[in-house]
Image (tube, rainbow, N blue to C red):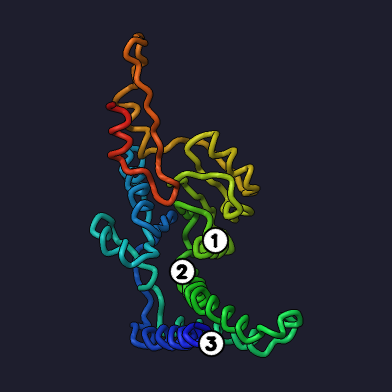
Amino acid sequence: SSLRKFRYVVGRSIKELLLGMYRNSNHFQFSNSDLIFFIEYGNHFKQYKSISNHPSLANLNHKVFFLNSAVYSNNSNAVEEPILIDDLHSSRDYLVSFIKMWFVNFKIIFGNKLYNNFNENKWRLIVELLYLNSKTLINKYLIERSVSRYLKDVKTAVFFKAEGYKIRSLIELVKNNCVHTISIQHGLIKKNIKYNNLKVDEYIVWSDFFKKELDKSESECLSVALGCPDYDIHFTRKPIKKSTSVEHLSKLLFLPNSGKSQTPESEIVLALTI
């Protein structure tokens, strides 16, 4: 398996470089905006649409950056001037990212300090580190080089999560360019180490409960409870009536999903109509 992972390291980096060489080196062109949304998953896009469709934001001048090509393909028609992150990368970006990644990898291969206590499994550890670097560093360097070129006039960047290596790197990059960062809750939040020391400036959550969960996780960011546009609209349409009769009282236990994705709208409607 170590040999297979080493082949992946070499093959992935060469593949990324060759693909980059075939890309147009001209930078992607689009009109400037002082607000941008970063979309990674389909549920992030649903949350974005709920916000952008609000009457008070109808004329909001903004841009949408897609981090996932599949999500871009499925939803780009619903956005004016959609931007796929991969389209921002030039051939030079790929070359520089390739060189930087292997500079780090060579330091791992020929470094000694890290392996003083791992003499028996030294090469297995090296392959594991090269494997992880190959999966993350190329994307990290590509995004750093390409996205930073388009942040000159941006004042605020909105994300729909603040955890995960890709989003953390993006948030740090955006903040280094003096852009204010906001994350909006899109799924359940519970006390977890992944929410520790978040770099985002503000985290907008659904309620005080989730605000407390972030505090318990030592998120160290400003959290604000503002509700959820995608769900709140159902409560305003159909108020929940309290039953005055206890003769035929039935108990309902409503369990949203585990937090991996946003609870489907159909489940919210069903719970309110039962």
Query: Above or below — where is 70 with respect to 2?
Result: above
| Relative to 158, residue 82 above or below | below
Between the residue at mark 3 and the residue at mark 1, the CA separation in whole angstroms equals 23 Å
Q: Which residue is mark 2?
A: 147
Identify the secondary structure beneath mark 3: helix
Q: Residues within 10 Å of mark 3 (few under 14, many from 20)?
A: some
Q: Is residue 146 above or below residue 237?
A: below
Disc 1 designates what residue?
A: 168
Disc 2 marks a residue whose amino acid type is: Val
Residue 109 vs residue 119: left or right?
A: left
What amino acid is labelled 1 in the image?
A: Arg
Q: Which residue shows up at 36% across the image and 9% down it?
A: 244
Placement of 36 over or under 242, stated as above or below = below
**Type of amino acid under label 3:** Ile
In which quadrant of the rendered image does the C terminus lie? top left
> Which numbered dot is residue 99?
3
Percent coordinates x, y for residue 62 in the rendering:
38, 54
**Marks 3 & 1, CB-CB < 8 Å contact:** no
Does residue 116 show up? yes
